[in-house]
Image: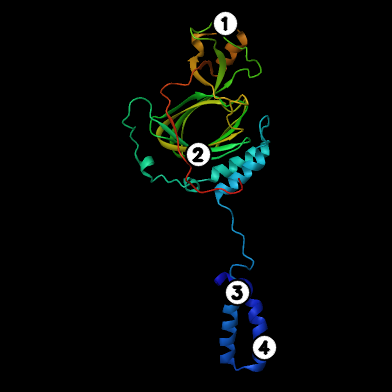
Amino acid sequence: MGAGVVELGPGVVEVGAAEAVQTVPPAKRRRVLAVKTLKAAAAAAGRGPRLARRPPAIQRLFQACRAVFRGPGTVPKPAEVALLRAMLDKMRPEDFGLSPDMPFFRNRDAPATEGTPAITHTTIYKSEKFSMVLFFLPTNAVIPLHNHPGMTVFNKLLIGSMHAKSYDWADPDDPANESGASSPDGKLRLAQLIVDDVFTAPCDTSVLFPTAGGNMHRFRAVAPSAFLDILGPPYSIEEDRDCTYYTDIPYSLHPMTSNELIGDEQEGRRLAWLKEVEMPRDLKMCSVRYGGPPISGR
């Protein structure tokens, strides 16, 4: 009712006051004006013009993603990357219905289970152009080294602390750049180490691209953690964007004779060999239904 008075009251009072001055005493005039104002506000409730509310942060993020991601074979422009990164940098756990005070995040001990702790994920949204997925990792949970073929991925750590290790191919334009010697299980391909560090929330958003930024990465939870992945486009077996897993091997175990590569290593270009492997058997992933703040306009 207060909002209706702010929008509609002045006009009503002005007209009513002009009539009242000519016909009624001051005391009665005030009562008449009050009644008219209340009736006008009540009549306008539900159908009068209202001030537009600013959409929630997750809704604004979703709308930005719809504008930025154009589908397979495309990469967002630098200005678009900067826009999404700036939006994500400002987002908090509460924007996704999360809180560091939740029991899951307060239990910093590793789960009392055999093998690697299970990882939970929930999909907020998915289309052929992009997907928004939340991951929840208990202490010591590991997402193995894997790739993102043809994708641009925004990663935002919301809660907790994780160790990240990422690589790009040393020569992305030459898939045949392999070691002269094969491992017992197959060929090795040369990669450059991009990131090998621990990140604690809140921290900056990371972005990886099809051939840069650490397209192949591995995560290990140092503490109970939650992070958001925005993948554009998402994985698709039908469109040849399946997830491939790797193991990394020190460069020194299979050195190449190329003086150029040796020089790069000596100049600080940290190199390693990656070998494609099957999905680790101890990887436990559990999907749950998203129950956080909704988004509209699907």
The answer to whether residue 69 is left or right of residue 93 is right
Residue at figure coordinates x 38%, y 33% from the top left: 139
Residue, far left = 112
Using the numbered discs, state the Cα–Cα distance from disc 4 to disc 1 in whole angstroms.
98 Å
The label on residue 19 is 4
- Amino acid type assigned to the residue bearing label 1 in the image: Gly
Q: Which residue is mark 2?
A: 203
Label 3 – label 2 distance at C-alpha: 50 Å
Where is 219 relative to 3, above or below?
Answer: above
Q: Earlier in the sequence, mark 4 or mark 1?
A: 4
Of badges 4 and 1, nearer the viewer stands: 4
Count of all numbered marks drawn on residues in the image:
4
Q: Secondary structure at mark 2?
A: loop
Viewport quadrant of the N terminus: bottom right
Q: Position of residue 186 (x, y in %)?
A: 52, 9
Residue 296's x, y, as percent? 58, 49
Tell me the CA gap for discs 2 and 1.
41 Å
Residue position for label 1: 180
Give the labeled residue for mark 3. Answer: 43
Q: Which one is in front, 131 or 173? A: 131
Q: How far apart are the alpha carbons under marks 1 and 3?
A: 83 Å
Residue at the spot 59% in from the left edge and 67% down from the top edge: 46
User: Alpha carbon of mark 4 to alpha carbon of mark 2: how far?
Assistant: 63 Å
Mark 2 vs 1, N-terminal side: 1
Name the quadrant of the C terminus.
top right
- Residue 14, by quadrant, is bottom right
Tell me which label, 3 or 2, sits earlier in the chain. 3
**Callout 4 secondary element:** helix
Mark closer to the observer (4, 3): 3
Q: Amino acid at mark 3?
A: Ala
